[in-house]
Amino acid sequence: MLNRLPTAKGNIFCACGAFGCQCAELCRFGDSQGLGASVRSLARGDRIYPSDQPCMRFHVVRTGLVATCAMTLDGRRQILCLNVAGDVICAMSAKGAECWCEALAPSEICELDLTSQAARLRGEPGFLRALFDLAHDRLERSAAHLIALGRLDGMERLCGFLAEMTRRTGRRIGQRWLVCLPMSREDIADYLGLNSDTVSRLMTRIKQAGLVRFLSVSEFEVASLERLEDRVPNSLARHLSDCEQPDEELML
Amino acid sequence: MLNRLPTAKGNIFCACGAFGCQCAELCRFGDSQGLGASVRSLARGDRIYPSDQPCMRFHVVRTGLVATCAMTLDGRRQILCLNVAGDVICAMSAKGAECWCEALAPSEICELDLTSQAARLRGEPGFLRALFDLAHDRLERSAAHLIALGRLDGMERLCGFLAEMTRRTGRRIGQRWLVCLPMSREDIADYLGLNSDTVSRLMTRIKQAGLVRFLSVSEFEVASLERLEDRVPNSLARHLSDCEQPDEELML
DNA sequence: CGTGTTTTTGATCCGCGTCAATTTGGGTGG
DNA sequence: CCACCCAAATTGACGCGGATCAAAAACACG
């Protein structure tokens, strides 16, 4: 990728602290008193609505799980994007559309409001590259998500989802993975374009197949991540899994 | 939106000429001999594969219709994005994934290769803003597409698609719209996450309902675009329709 | 005018949605 | 610590939308 920045470590301007994440680069642009950055706690269900100076307010997830959501006019919800610890959410334009951010689990976020710096930052290449990086990231995830919703069946989508959560938030213990899954079946369904009953049914089959083992309803263990991912014929999702090697391209 | 640039008219560096489009701004960054810009003709089915210097090669659609495609490992195709005359395609990173651009109809594209300028452009705010705009645009479309695939049924998706094509490529004639639809049922199906038989069946029902009238298999007329759009409960799609008013936000 | 391709249409099947009945589990108060 | 309660999850029965397969019709092109 063109503009992938080296993930600098946290810095004094940013209340998000020590993440080696997308956040760090953006936080460099906060002012020197650390103004514009503040920490907020969200309970499950709490929402953040966009304000009117787009692309200048960022929300960095410190802990928990925050979803970017949209709704059809008759109230069906679709989760567009999941944000885990370290992810940066940027409020972008979507005039009039029913669109918001929602904590799926108790979460802590760091709010970074660079509105006051807007004029300066529009001419700042480093900031613009970080912003582009953010959008680029979302586009890649979005493409993988589109394939899942358009061309994979329920079982494939759910296996892909579990594998994704494992890669993004799981703790590796030897050959196994331990993953916390702090969202309801309903939330999972709204991410995968299914309904919660179907998710529940599929989950049962996945357990029976021995692909995952649930310790509680919100924590599971993966014996072989490879075996799980073999169920997911999504080339773009695989791409997201191993983000170390140099990138090839995708048509924007 | 933060960085929406005024759509400057075409300029001498760009073979794409007189589009009042996203293209124009990018073309400013071509070198003064107009190098890096060349016109190519594509037949239906012709493909463009990404090369290895991402985000520095652009393809501007002059005429025709070009799809951004991806494929599952077992060969199911999903169209991620449709690009009509005036749209700019940027090859971005998607390591290893089966991912390409494909002309759905005979098309002319203008290739703009800024690879040689990469070092300079990484520090150029205007270029970076244009790049971000491009990504932002795609993200908005992508979000509307995700809602369609995740939460709308076949009829709603197809009506939404026809309305989208009408808005993007249709010619207005008084109260009516005349729209050229130069893609196969298969292509439409791959865009909407359906199969071609289903698209055909739904199309029949849409004709019977009097929402559109087909002059040939690839050209149709819309008597009342409003009536068509009333079938589509997709708030994000509506947002894309009326791009004149100032934007609100969407969570990136 | 004939031939291959795309589209349409019909018959049938299956995955997923819907609705309802249980079960599970976490939280609270006695 | 146990009994109770409520919300979430599971499971079953059933129906529908869309996939599949096959045949017929429409169309494109030489």
Image (tube, coloured by chain):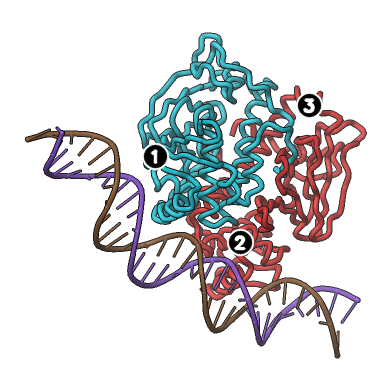
Chain colours: A cyan, B red, C brown, D purple
Q: CA distance from mark 2 to mark 1?
A: 48 Å
Report which quarter residue B157 is drawn in: bottom right
Q: Which residue is mark 1?
A: A215
Amino acid type at circle 1 is Leu
Q: Residue at x 70, y 52 (%)?
A: B69
* B54 to A234, vertically: above or below: above
Real-space Cα separation, disc 1 to disc 3, in angstroms: 51 Å
| Image position, residue A123 (x, y; %) | 68, 21
Q: Pick whichever, A69 or A181, lies toward us.
A: A181
Crowding around mark 3 (Cα neighbors within 10 Å: few <14, some 14 to 19, many 20+) is: some
Q: What residue is pinned by disc 3?
A: B121
Chain of the residue on which disc 3 is drawn: B
Camera-nearest label, 3 or 2: 3
According to the picture, the residue beneath numbered tag 2 turns out to be: B162
Percent x, y of residue A140: 64, 40
Position of the N terminus of chain B, as image quadrant, is top right
Image x and y of residue A131, in percent = 63, 28
Farthest residue to the right: give it: B33
User: Dot 2 falls on which chain?
Assistant: B
Are labels 1 and 3 assigned to the same chain?
Answer: no
Q: Secondary structure at mark 3?
A: helix
